[in-house]
Amino acid sequence: MSVDQQNQPVVLVSNLVKKYGDFMAVKGVNFAVYPGECFGLLGPNGAGKTSIVRMTYGFSPVSGGKLSVFGEDIMIRPRAIKSRIGVISQDDDLDPVLSVRENLMIYAGYFQIGKQIAKKRCEEILSFMDLQDKSDEPVENLSGGLRRRLTLGRALINQPALLLLDEPTTGLDPYARHLVWHRLRRLKEEGTTMLLTTHYMEEASQLCDRLIIMYQGEIVEEGHPEGLIDRHLGREALELGTGGECPDSLFDDSRELIRGRQGMGDDLVLFTDHGLELMDRVAAQADRQKTPIRYRRLRPSNLEDVFLQLTGESLREDGAAPLPGKRGEEEGEDVR
Ligand SMILES: Nc1ncnc2c1ncn2[C@@H]1O[C@H](COP(=O)(O)OP(=O)(O)O)[C@@H](O)[C@H]1O
Ligand SMILES: [Mg+2]
């Protein structure tokens, strides 16, 4: 569904602040989420994403600025707003001793949904999330992926117009992650508006129409995933195993093709819109001046690169080298 910015935003955030004591976790953030779009908050741990989500459903008070949902101020009309929102919080808060179906039915009770309607919706959700086989199983027996599916299903019990998804696939294996993505896409096709947080750049690329990149409580960039890559870097990334010593003369013949560069350990990544040509020219120059290059690898640029370029840090919580795929190509080729 295309984004209709003519309409009133579903979520409107202006100068939003969240403080915990003296600590400012969200430092005056502005954004709007329009009907039918999936809007992403992308950023590493501690960026302030969960704080924003919690304020959006009235779970945590706004410390400053304004936050309205469906045109109503969340601090003034939280109940009316909550009845139209579905929430997938970052932490699993299912009841472990109850069965899958019981978890759904109890949740329906919070929204005062009548028993007959609740039963019907419950069966629809079990089918939509592929959980029929597990409906009588206690939640404590389920894998992480099945629990996350149930959490997503549970958030649909009140047929929400807005879904808040806080790290919906963190900790899931690739199969479970793709299944959740598939269901979220279907909900989006049906017109559900989504506010989604993630620190997986692939998740943001796959699902979000627009996103903001957050870092330490502030917005560092915003736009369409593709647009951000294009604006900052160029479509392709050329990884070069140059080692610590990389004379600038290596790029004498190719400077006009290079839109950005980024260190990757001792090695180097160049960003460009002309990957093959850049690779050829650098290789020819390296031959001429006898600069050893242990590997060359061309890949699409991604949001992780954008984040690294903007902040100098990796999105990923493990702090590992942010750019993938280097190890295999190094084998047996190290000339140092
Ligand atoms: N209840 C809280 N009390 C104090 N500090 C908090 C609390 N919740 C979050 N923080 C801090 O606020 C910052 C933002 O946290 P959070 O919103 O959870 O970020 P994210 O979801 O992007 O990881 C972090 O530094 C975190 O430690
Ligand atoms: Mg979080």
Image: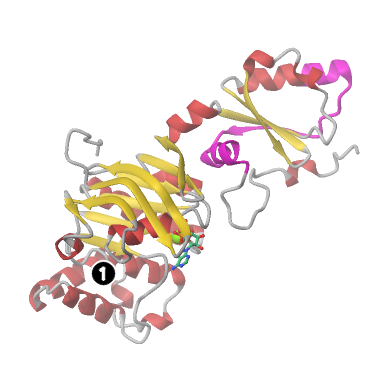
Tell me, yes or no, if residue 179 can be seen here.
no
**Residue at point 83%, 24% (across, down):** 247
Tell me, yes or no, if residue 286 can be seen here.
yes
**Residue at point 86%, 24% (across, down):** 291
* Image height of 311 relative to 288, above or below: below
Task: Check the picture and name the quadrant holding the N terminus.
Answer: top left
In this orientation, which residue lies closer to the viewer: 221 or 109?
221
Relative placement, left or right, of 228 versus 77 is right
Relative placement, left or right, of 213 versus 29 is right
From the top left corner, tell me how far across and down residue 235 is, in percent. Answer: 53, 27
In this orientation, which residue lies closer to the viewer: 103 or 165?
165
From the top left corner, tell me how far across and down residue 120 is, in percent. Answer: 13, 71
**Residue at point 27%, 78% (across, down):** 103
**Magenta-drawn stretch contains 295:** yes
From the top left corner, tell me how far across and down residue 316 is, in percent. Answer: 58, 53
From the top left corner, tell me how far across and down residue 7 is, in percent. Answer: 17, 37
In this orientation, which residue lies closer to the viewer: 70 or 114?
70
**Residue at point 59%, 19% (across, down):** 274
Residue 224's image quarter?
A: top left
Q: Which residues are magenta?
A: 283-312
Crowd rating for badge 1 (residues with CA inside 10 Å; few <14, some 14–19, many 20+): many
Helix, strand or loop under label 1:
helix
* Image height of 242 relative to 118, above or below: above
Q: Specify the farthest residue to the bottom.
A: 97
User: Which residue is the site of mark 1?
Assistant: 126
- Marker count (numbered): 1
Residue 319's image quarter?
A: bottom right
Task: Check the picture and name the quadrant holding the C terminus.
Answer: top right
**Which quadrant of the picture is home to ligand 2?**
bottom left
Q: Amino acid at mark 1?
A: Leu
**Magenta-drawn stretch contains 243:** no
